[in-house]
Structure formats: structure tokens, C-alpha cells
Amino acid sequence: MPREIADFHQVSKLDYGLVESLRVNPRTGCVSWVDIEIGTLSTLSTGVKGGEERVNLLPHASFAESLPELGYVFAAGQHLGVRDETGNVSLSPTLLSPGRRFNDGAIDKLGRLVIGSMNFDNSDNKNVLLLVELDGAITVLDSDLGLSNGIVVAPETGALFSVDTLRRTVYRRDLDIETSVYGPRQVFAAFDPGENPDGIAYSATGHLVVALWGSAAVAILDASGREVQRVSVPPVFATSVCIRPDTGALLVGGASQPREKLTTATMTGGVWEAESWLEGYPVTTWSQPRNDYTMIKLGSQRVIV
């Protein structure tokens, strides 16, 4: 039986609206996240020069992953982009229609960017899951999603897990390493009505951690997709989860409240942490060649969907 995960403490100090894309930089141990509602990128370090820093990125910034040169590859609105180590930002062409934006993403085992989309308003069930190949071409993995949300990769097998929040479903795809091709999606887990899976994280123990929007909880699933533990967390609107690769501590991002008429209590969004029995792992870094960081090739195959 998994040990209890409790005693969460808030590690963020500033006020946030909608925290997303919690990450731990494997080289520095720095925690990062974006705030979709105010378009910022935040970093939190605990070293000698530790502290919380927040910089403006772009409106609707929904994903950011650190690069070897201390910059970030990110998604914002209908664009993908890079913020380099000096703070300069370069953007791809417009890749999505005006009615939708990018949402969460991940880097797969081969160093490729996987990113999903959602509608600004009511879903048309035509949202996409995109794979940005190493040459910048774009492969459409899904085009029928209600709301693409959390994405994560199993480090050893390369299996890809992705969430469709409106269908309350977590999908799994196997990766053929030799051909670099993903197999068909399969339902890994389905949640009950009223439970809304959001961000996800993969543990080196083989478990998948799922943030549950509106439930003040995260669910921990075993390798078969069976829920083995439900963990109460401070934010009602849990958005993103991450496991520290050094200590196994569980990080949970949350949105501000009240919202969606589910609660009247007031709470600012932020990031919380607790000790856990889980085991993190260093994520794969984006493998675009250095001369492609200008995003000239990224999105050269325009995908307006």
C-alpha cells in the first residue's frame, strides 16, 4: 500500500491565476511554471541566490520546457517559440486557428516536442495533438480532442501519455524506437463524471500522477491504469504536477479561486510541495539543432486547424 502523501506547504510566494507546466530543471534543480492568465514565466531556485522570479512571456503562455542553454521552448496562443538565455524571444508562424490556442506539452524520448490545443470558447471537439519532428515538420497525432491537456513520456519505453480533459480520459501510445513512430492511442484510464484530469507526471516507480481540476486532489495510477491512491491537495483547482528528480517530492500547481461556481472561498494560484514515495526522473531536452532555435523551420509545415 503506498504511503500517505500529506503536509503540503506552499513554495510560491507571489500571486498567480492559472499555474501550468510545472517543471524541474535537471541541471539546476530550479522549478519553473507558466501562468496562462497573465502570460508569465516563473522560476524558483533554492540555492545561495535562491528566490522566486517572474518575467513576462506572452499572452496565453501555456507550456515552457528548459533548454540546455538555460532558455526555454514554449507555447503561447497560436505560436510556438523560444526564449533564449538572454531573454530574446523568437516565434513560429501561426499554427492554429484564431478560435483555439496551444495548451500543455512535453518533450518525448527522442527529443521531439509534443503539444496539444484547446478552444478559447466551447469545444468543437477538433483539437489536436501535434508532434514537432526534428526537422521542424509537424505530424498530427490527434485531431478529434475535446481539450488536450497534460502530456508526459515514460523515460525507459518512450510511451506517450496524454489527457483529453473533456472526455475525462488519459490515453497511452507506444513508441517504436527504431522507426520513431507512435502506435495508435489506447485508453489508459477513464475518470468518473465530475472528475476532470488536467496535468500529469510520470514516476520512475511506473506510476502516473494526475491532477484533478475542481477536486482538490491528485490521483495516482499504477502501470495498468488502476487508481491506487487519491491524495488531497490544498488547491481545489489542481492544474499541474511534477516530481523532483532528486528527492521525489511531489509538486502541485493550482489555479486561483473562486471560479466555475464550484467554490466561493478565495485563494490565489500557486505551487505546493510535499514529501512522497514517488521517484522523479530527469526529463529529455528538446533536440532541435542549435541553428533552428530561431524557429525558422519550426512550423514550416503550416498546420491551421
Image (spheres, helix red, strand yellow):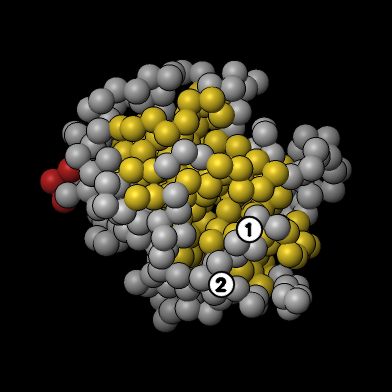
**Residue lying furthest right:** 264
On the image, numbered disc 2 is attached to which residue? 205
Select label 1 or label 2 by which is in front: 1
On the image, numbered disc 1 is attached to which residue? 224
Return the residue nearer the eye: 288 or 67: 288
- Direction from residue 286 to residue 102 in the image, left or right: right
- Taking the spot 43% from the left edge, 72% from the top edge, the residue there is 29
Instruction: Name the element at disc 2.
Output: loop
**Residue lying furthest left:** 291
- Taking the spot 19% from the left edge, 34% from the top edge, the residue there is 297
Return the residue nearer the eye: 80 or 17: 80
Return the residue nearer the eye: 214 or 133: 133
Instruction: Name the element at disc 1.
Output: loop
Marks counted in the figure total: 2
Residue 49 x, y percent position in the rendering: 41, 76
Compared with 141, 227 (above or below) is below
Return the residue nearer the eye: 8 or 40: 8
Residue 210 x, y percent position in the rendering: 64, 54
Q: What's the residue type where badge 1 is placed? A: Ser
Q: What's the residue type where badge 2 is placed? A: Thr
Q: Tag 2 or tag 1, which sits nearer the N-term?
A: 2
Residue 85, quarter of the rendered image: bottom left
Residue 39 x, y percent position in the rendering: 49, 40
Q: Label 1, label 2: how many angstroms apart (C-alpha)? A: 13 Å
Compared with 199, 274 (above or below) is below
- Taking the spot 60% from the left edge, 28% from the top edge, the residue there is 146
CA neighbours of label 2 inside 10 A, class few (<14), some (14 to 19), many (20+)? few
- Direction from residue 260 to residue 13 in the image, left or right: left
Quadrant location of the N terminus in the rendered image: bottom right
- Direction from residue 119 to residue 274 in the image, left or right: right
